[in-house]
Amino acid sequence: MKIKALNVVYSEAEIAERIKLLAAQINKDYAGEDLVVVCVLKGAFMFFSDLVKQLDMNPELDFVRCASYGKGTTSTKTISFTKDLEVSIEGKHVLVVEDIVDTGHTMAFLFKQLEARGAKSIRLAAIVDKSERREVDIAVHYPGFALQKGFIVGYGMDYAEKYRELGAIYEAVVD
């Protein structure tokens, strides 16, 4: 598969505006609470960075890496936990920040791991909530954009480890 064109789905300005709204709701929901914000690497790094700069509760930040796609475009359904949390989440609210929720398998796996560690609550923010291939019922509490279908890259999301650096979200046209 080769990408032959990229078409803007969500511009940098649209993304920035949506993140402001999400951050305002998160600030309201967690006012006066201890919060750990967890970035799911690699794809969520841009969204995570832009989001946490607008949070006003002084959250703890940490990172995990769950791999299910490898270098392809379809989930293997086998999740590997390749980077673990470094802070304790026991008794704390946890906000997971993800780039895209697609099948839901990765988030279901991660939520089970976090629940087992005694998190007080777990919520999910995803810049894209894509329903086309959803196989696991997972709630996206803070959705950036709802997308029915399409193969997207940019703003941290990749195809074979490329296109993450793009500031907008694009639909990839493939041949």
Image (tube, helix red, strand yellow):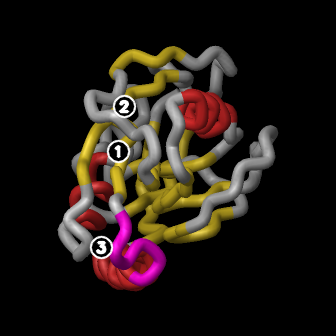
Residue tagged 1: 39
Which label number is shown at residue 68?
none
- Pinpoint residue 117: horizontal percent, then vertical percent: 51, 30
**Could you tell whether 151 is left or right of 39 in the image?**
right
Relative to residue 97, is residue 33 depicted above or below?
below
Q: CA distance from mark 2 to mark 1?
A: 6 Å
Query: At 64% across and 26% down in the image, what residue appears?
Result: 75
Residue tagged 2: 64
Q: Is residue 73 visible?
A: no
- What secondary structure is the magenta-colored segment mainly? loop
Q: Looking at the picture, tell me which residue is in the foreground, 94 or 21.
A: 94
- Pinpoint residue 163: horizontal percent, then vertical percent: 31, 43
Helix, strand or loop at label 2? It is: strand
Is mark 2 in CB contact (under 8 Å) with mark 1? yes
User: Residue 88 occupies which quadrant of the picture?
Assistant: top left
Q: Which residues are magenta?
A: 28-33
Residue tagged 3: 12
**Could you tell whether 68 is left or right of 87 in the image?**
right
- Type of amino acid at the residue the image marks with label 2: Val
- Type of amino acid at the residue the image marks with label 3: Glu
Mark closest to the chain's N terminus, 1 or 3? 3
Mark closest to the chain's N terminus, 2 or 1? 1
